Image (spheres, rainbow, N blue to C red):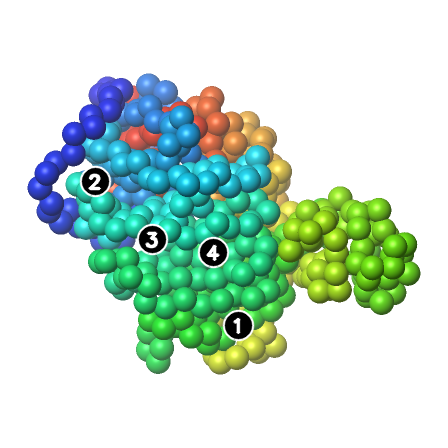
Amino acid sequence: MLFMLAHEGCVASSEHQSRGLVEGAWSRFRGPNGSGVATASGLPAEFGLGRNEIWRTPLPPGHSSPVLSAEYVFLTAVDEDTLYTYAVDRRTGRVRWRAPAPRPRREALDRLNDPASPTPVTDGDGVYVFFGDFGLIAYEVDGSERWQLPLGPFDNAYGMGASPVLVGDLVIQVCDQKTDSFMVAVDKRDGSVRWRVERPGSSTGHSTPILYETRANGAQLLVPGSFQLTAYAGGTGERLWWVRGLAFEMKATPVLDPSSETVFINGTSASAFEDSYDRAIPAFDEIIGSDADGDGLLNRDEIPDQLARRWIKLIDLDGNGLLDRGEWEWYRAARASQGGVNAFRTGGSGDMTASSFLWNHDRSVPQLPSALLYEGVLYMVNDGGVVTLLDAATGAVLDRGRLQGAIDSYYASPVAADDKVYMVSETCKIAVLEPGTVLKVLAVNDLDEVCFATPAIEGDRIYVRTRSNLHAFGVQKGAD
């Protein structure tokens, strides 16, 4: 069995040459169009430290997921307060280069977030990264910097988390926050802003878009936000159509079934967290009598709703410690939002909710992990570790349960290839499932580390990024 512990080599090649991408490359968050599905073969079901392990490279922490060019694994990390982009040799596991990024500020982050959470995107000739503490940066594949575009500062309740994506020669970055949310398109060659659109009403989420290809409008960006999913023209940013019924804050990436032109998107509504509270929250005029000081605003002690008092930092969009009419109405909408996982037909013009809605399921739905569509079955693992299998065509529940041997919290999204579904827990228990209508665990692999990143799959290898290492696993001759 071949095993290599890779060490850092900081000297980058001075020559620039196109490394390219293999067909179906895992070049962005969750691989081909964010699906989480790869065309691969010969992947291991059983692996771990020293077992079917091709190499292991120690790296500083970061929640970003690995992405792949033909030669490199790219990811980001934070090392002693410095933000870095890393390029790791796919064959040997050696660090070929790492490049520091400016860090003019420090975002306030949720405990599940990280300064290096957004995942890079690559076209094989360059790699494009986003840090909430700076903005966008592009590098050549040899590690030399191509351009910088400062963005922010941001005010997201959890910290920024959406990853950049590529549409032709444009790098697209969604920047949803408490107020003044926007999406920007940047020329990947020189960093110039080609278009920017405001996203009013989208708040605190961090969903990464996917693409929907059409003959009439070319590539469309499908972008979740508070209460709705919106389709934008990739080349211009024009808002084309949208569907309503989503949760009040969206973190998962949509999943597209091109064969049926159906999009699936999951998110948890506020009421799912607090079953003891009714969804029907009174209007502002009905509660303003609680305004003891008569200023027309509600401070924490004046708010009559228990959940709203606990969530005031989230609801208080302008950060002044008081709730006005607009903020209270946003909270009412959040409590009334359907959430769950929704299936919609894609396409159209304007509000397509009524004509595009197919089905909704609202039990044991993940807040963070994205759903996985594989061989007609929609797989979900929620943050608490409950796995649900749904018939993608109807939304009918096929099976539900916990992963025996891997009962844990889950924040990484499931991925699949080679008739295997991989689910990674927070303590890096990696359950391998047999695809089908019944929840069947083939193996549980325990790396005994902390993991928030979604694995990458290509060829005959699966790449797993933990808090302290990047692992490459593949079937080894003579392995037990």
Sequence-wise first label, 3 or 1: 3
Name the amino acid type tagged 1: Trp
Q: Which residue is mark 2?
A: 143
Q: Which mark is residue 242?
A: 1
Sequence-wise first label, 3 or 4: 3
**Few, some or many C-alpha atoms within 10 Å of disc 2 (few <14, some 14-19, many ≥20)?**
many
Q: Which residue is mark 4?
A: 175
Q: Is residue 123 left or right of residue 410?
A: left
How far apart, in angstroms, are the residues tagged by discs 2 and 3? 17 Å
Image location (x, y in percent) of residue 396: 61, 58
Name the amino acid type tagged 4: Cys
Q: Which residue is mark 3?
A: 149
Q: Which mark is residue 192?
A: none
Residue at x 37%, y 32% (from the top left corner): 82
Q: Quadrant of the N terminus?
A: top left
Tag 2 near tag 3, CB within 8 Å: no
Sequence-wise first label, 2 or 3: 2
- Residue 263 seen by the camera: no
How far apart, in angstroms, are the residues tagged by discs 1 and 2? 39 Å
Q: Secondary structure at mark 2?
A: loop
Image location (x, y in percent) of residue 53: 30, 25
Q: Quadrant of the C terminus?
A: top left
Tell me if residue 169 comes above or below residue 153 in the rendering. Answer: below
How far apart, in angstroms, are the residues tagged by discs 3 and 4? 13 Å
Q: Nearer the viewer, residue 471 or 206?
A: 206
Image location (x, y in percent) of residue 465: 38, 33
Circle 3 or circle 1, nearest the eye: 3
